[in-house]
Image (spheres, rainbow, N blue to C red):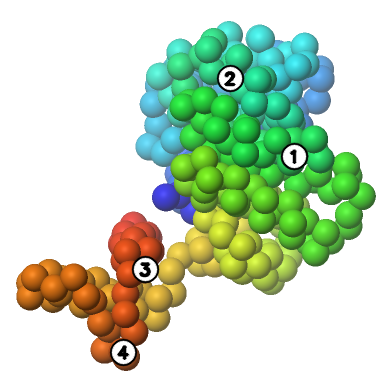
Amino acid sequence: MLLSWLYVPGDRPDRFAKAVTSGADAVILDLEDAVVAGRKAYARDAVAEFLAEAHAVPVQVRVNELTGPDVDADLSAVCGRPGLGGLRLPKVESAATVAALADRVDVPLHPLVESALGLEAAYPIASAHPAVASIGLGEADLRSDLGVGDDDGLLWARGRVVVAARAAGLVPPAMSVYPDVADVAGLAASCAVGRRLGFLGRAAIHPRQLPVIVEAFRPADREVARAAELLAAVAEAQRRDSGTVVLPDGRFADRAMVAAARRTVDLAARYAA
């Protein structure tokens, strides 16, 4: 259960080590949109060199489009490197594409849905292969494809990806990046909407966004207290050999509530100050 990812352009090796120590739960080195065509080879070599050893947090690589001319060189450069923690796959539109790649590499895959066609195939993509560890949205491209200009136009798309991920047995997805680095209040408000939809965490494009993201998705003290209360009631019911769990306020607790409470307590412990 990770709450924050930090994107770093693949042609900025001066930022790689700083990203690992930035406080992000994971780092994504980007060989795709963040790197212009003339610097792809340089970025590829820089990323491969950085991945020659493992790092303190997982480091993933966003490769170029799977149907494009650069992806084979990307895979040759980074796959098999000790520091590679996964591949971000941009602009995925079919399960077959993901399954074909999974047969070529031995690393967790994280497909990104960035078009209407990809959105229609969200569940098949999420369940395409056991190597798929998560799915997510690439909202900039999706906005362009759908012709929407604000978050309201993405509500259905976001909800669909959340449902597809959970239906496939994957962790809840992380939100796409928030492009306005200076708009801290807007980022916090957008994260709050995403959390209500079922997202868990968000990708960032600048370290200053990381504390806002973690604060937005980390369980609040009142949530942790209620979860702990529920788990204490479960423990008491087990002590009494009773299958019925009743909370102090009179509510009955079922298995789904217990599972959610355990996730809340575990997540809070992970991000305790």
Reading the image, the residue beneath label 3 is 257
The amino acid type found where label 3 is placed reads: Met
Asked whether disc 2 touches disc 3, contact meaning CB atoms under 8 Å apart, the reply is: no
Cα separation, mark 2 vs mark 3, equals 35 Å
The amino acid type found where label 2 is placed reads: Ala
Reading the image, the residue beneath label 2 is 99
Q: Is residue 121 above or below residue 201?
A: above
Q: Nearer the viewer, residue 68 or 26?
A: 68
- Point out which mark residue 250 bears: 4
Q: Is residue 238 above or below residue 92?
A: below
Residue furthest to the right in view is: 147
The amino acid type found where label 1 is placed reads: Glu
- Disc 1 is placed on an element classified as helix
The answer to whether residue 146 is seen in the rendering is yes
- Left or right, 221 with respect to 168, comes to left
Viewer-side label of 4, 2: 4
Which tag, 2 or 3, sits closer to the chain's start?
2
Q: Exactly how many numbered labels are in the figure?
A: 4
Q: Position of residue 108 (x, y in %)?
A: 48, 27
Which tag, 4 or 2, sits closer to the chain's start?
2
The C terminus - image quarter:
bottom left
Which tag, 1 or 4, sits closer to the chain's start?
1
The answer to whether residue 4 is seen in the rendering is no
Reading the image, the residue beneath label 1 is 120
